[in-house]
Amino acid sequence: MGRFLLVFRLVWSDVRRHPGQAAMLLLSLSVATGMLALGGSLGGATEALYRHTRAVTAGPDVVAVSPDNSAATARTQDALTSDPAVTAHSGPYLQYYSKLKAKGSTSHVVVTAADAEPGAVDHPLVTSGTWVRSGGVVVERGFANALGVRVGDRITVAGRSLPVIGTAVSAATTVYPFAQLTGPDGGPSDYSGLVWMTKQDTKPLAAKHLSVSSLLYLKLRDPDATQAFVSAHRGPTVYANFQSWQFMIGQDATIIEGSQPILVIGSWLLSFLAIAGVATLAAGRAAKQTRRVGLLKAVGATPGLIGAVLLTEYVTLALLADALGLTAARFTQPAVVNPTASLLTTTAGPSTGTIILTTVVALAVAILTTLGPTMRALRTETVAALSDTARQPDHRSRLTRVSAMLPVPVLLGLRLIARRPGRAFLQACSITATVITITALLIIFVQRQVSYGIDSPHLGNLKDAQSRHMIVVVAAALVVLAGVNTLTTTWTTALEARHTMAVARTLGATPGQVTAGLSAAQLLPTVPGALVGIPLGIAFVWPFSAAGTVYPPAWWLFSAALATVVITAALTALPARIAARRSVAQTLSAEIT
Amino acid sequence: MNQFQAVLQARDLLRTHGRGESLVHAVDGVDLDVPAGQMLAVMGPSGCGKSTLLHLLGGLERPSDGEVWLDGRRIDDLSERALAQLRRRSVGFVFQAFHLVEELSAAENVELPVLLAGRSLRTARRRADELLAQVGLDDRARHLPWQLSGGQRQRVAIARAMANEPLVLLADEPTGNLDTAATLDVLRLFEDLRAAGQTLVIVTHDERVAATADRLVSMRDGRLVDDTWMADRRQPVDGVHGWEG
Amino acid sequence: MQDVVLAMLAKEPSHGYHLREWLRRALGPLGESMNAGQIYVTLARLERAGLVVREQTEGPPDRKVYALTPAGQQRVTTWLTEVSWPKQDLAELHLKLAAARAARLADPVELVAAHRRELLRRLRQAQRALLAEPEGSVAGLLLEGVALRLQADLRWLRACEQFWSRVENKAEDE
């Protein structure tokens, strides 16, 4: 019991003494788990939204799309509605392929002739204004958002200006811009939005001989048996394409399919950065605490206690960060999973699987960061015992040997790296992670964007925009964290190298040389780290890139890598400079006690 | 250079730490002239400011007031960079805690100041071999500090301090962590240096170390309270009485 | 001195010359002041006391070989087993300082300083001699003892100085 109390007290005093470290761990891990939770929940998110929308709007199980309103279509539709598997139906509704102008943008549009009173299947949910009435248009909500139109605005449909009287959401169609269930005349489909008008108002469209299709909404006895139903109605006499609700979920999900890998890979990279940064801090701290070990021993504690304290503290912080990340993910999820607003938003939290995953990751980060220092603390006695025995006297690393031929600051830097190769590796990996993300960002941004509208720059590409937003957020988080990591690593290295640097100062090293040495210790691993990041970044994007992916010119990528190195240099100079300014006499006399 | 010309001078040297209530005069108005080739010992109880005085003399700390002159050049108002360059060539430090760079071998420790002074690696290697032979550690050149005994480490530190043939060698409790035999080794080294005309300032609380010096100043509360120049006549050793009986 | 000479003869009979050389080596710089004839004076005394005998009566004094008598043997055994430790008489200086202060004859701090300078001088000689000795010499061991004693005395003088200057300061304050 007393042991637990001691650990708890030490943890508490630790957190109070190093609030910055605790905050850094909390922040970086929150962001990482939040992203992971978000990325993890994206998989089923669209389905959840669609199911919700379908339940609210009495969505159809199958939509039968016939390419025209011929007699053959009518026969097919009769056959479908008389199938005993069908319990209810609505329609057929005619859908005209036309163009729409609003707020200076032009877009493909499908105009559905709707009943003033919806039938048994598909009750579109009016989200603003009213449902269709004569002389007014209801715009599908995702489409309205993209166009920027609201109730009261006027839009031009097939050359005829009409007021928008409402916006609505329906599960009988796929989300904007996939409103065309099949293309005009059964051909390939265009990016398109959806509007509803009264049958009366669509008469002028019919007169214009626009392409038309006929939609029949079917409710099945067994909603899960859509595949069997569709198979049963296949053949040369059947004059229709079928869209099951399951198919629509798949189609709807494509709008966010780019975000998931970005978020998931981004969260892995962030977790790694969190490990790299916090491990460095923990190591620096453990080194400081080794001096306290002797003191603790007097009260019956072992060096293992240091590890226990670190572990307890980090596990607690990691769990807290996990909770914060999951909460943040829950609140940001609606904005991420429903970029088109074509579906109704639900407040489904992260799934159990996601919670388990993020918790495991958070705990892994906590354990991985404390593993090194803990092991070292546990080994301290053994090492001390070993150091008494004579060992191979010719212990002189090649790195140290080579470094003697370099300018003095680089020499100091290299010898610092030789002292902690693991940290140099982590620093290199941090930079690699950052450059990977920046490379991915550049690749995503140079891709040609296919606008959803027709020569209408305002009607952007929601899917690409979503990916861009995500990569920008991930890259920003990574860059900030990598920057903080660089600062803390330099600072920790400076603290640990304080004695060596102070000795170098007594031997006549200038503050400038010491600063340069500390900077060099960080910079040297940064260069290979940045260079490796470029091909790795391309490799990360590769599996998700379609044919015809455009790559940015090589000099862009190298400039980005170079910029990373330069920024790292600037970041390392600051703490190194502060450390170099310390009084040599104080540092040396502090070492004695 | 004249035998009695001061190579190191302190004029009304003042060094305070802290401020207000907790203001401490670590060094409080010290005047001191160290002639070239002299071996000077500074004694005093711990906390009397003797280490601070040594740091001030070597340009490791800056005085709050007063002047420090090294070889006719005022050094207390030099820039940090100029001070570093001065330490490189003109001052050698030896500390109680040895302060070797733990990850460098004995030879590499000695090479370090030579490299810092901008000489070639070959020169540095040769100088290190030479100095380590002088301190009797040529067979330990490749050892890391933890593989050496305290006395050996201090001898490496002295070799390192001498690497650039400094004008003055400043030693802060050089034997404080050593046993009697190792202390004698270090004192023998100092004696050799003194014989070669090296100016030495040694801060110590060990009377036996102080007694080997040419001159002994005592410090108390930041001030010099006693200054004894010891004659160096060859005399029979007193101390064993009545053995004739 | 007598006991030392007896002890050296316990192993085997020896010339006075050899005895003198051995003593010089063991004492090192401390033996420099030793009179050359002193050893023979001592041997003569021992012979008179019946503790040693001359084995060869011819030749110059240098060539004389001395050996222990049973009585001499007895004396050596007694000497080796007896524990004696020279007393350092600090009381005299201590009382001198106290008296000087009480009678206002002199400043005890000044007296201490004078003693300190003298002891430092002696310590310096001892240290110098010690440093000149090669490593592992017997004489070095003796010098080490001398230096350690002087160091202890100097530390005591430091304590005296602190004590008496405090007393002095107090007196001024009153």
Image (cartoon, rainbow, N blue to C red):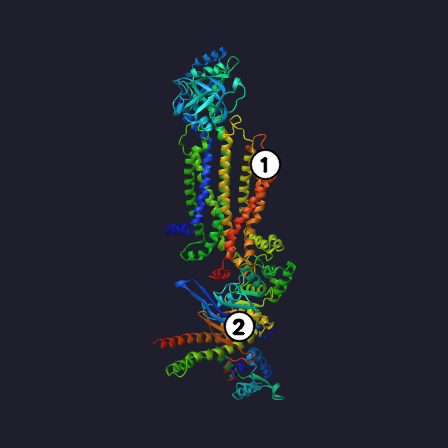
The x, y position of residue A284, in whole percent, is 48, 52
Q: Quadrant of the C terminus of chain C?
A: bottom left
Kindly give the residue lying farthest to the left in the view shown: C174
Of C62 and A316, the residue lying toward us: A316
Disc sitting over residue B33 in the figure:
2
Q: Chain of mark 2?
A: B
Q: Secondary structure at mark 2?
A: strand
Chain on which label 1 sits: A
Q: Are marks 2 and 1 in contact (CB under 8 Å)?
A: no
Q: Position of residue C154 (x, y in %)?
A: 46, 75
User: Which amino acid, by three-letter code, is at mark 1?
Assistant: Pro
Q: Nearer the viewer, residue C8 or B37?
A: B37
Say what secondary structure mark 1 lies in. loop
Q: What's the CA distance linking mark 2 and mark 1?
A: 71 Å
Q: Amino acid at mark 2?
A: Asp
Looking at the picture, do discs 2 and 1 lie on one chain?
Answer: no
Q: How many marks?
A: 2
Q: In the drawing, does residue A540 fall left or right of residue A57?
A: right
For disc 2, the neighbor class at 10 Å (few under 14, some 14 to 19, many from 20) is some
Q: Which residue is mark 1?
A: A552
C66 above or below A171?
A: below
Q: Is residue A111 visible?
A: yes
Residue neighbourhood size for the residue with mark 1, other residues' Cα within 10 Å, grouped as few (<14), some (14–19), many (≥20): some
Mark number for residue A41? none
Q: Nearer the viewer, residue B57 or A432?
A: B57
Q: Is residue B11 left or right of residue A347?
A: right
Horizontal and vertical percent position of residue A182 = 51, 20
Residue C84 visible in image = no
Question: In the picture, residue A539 is in which quadrant?
Answer: top right
Q: Position of residue B154 (x, y in %)?
A: 55, 65
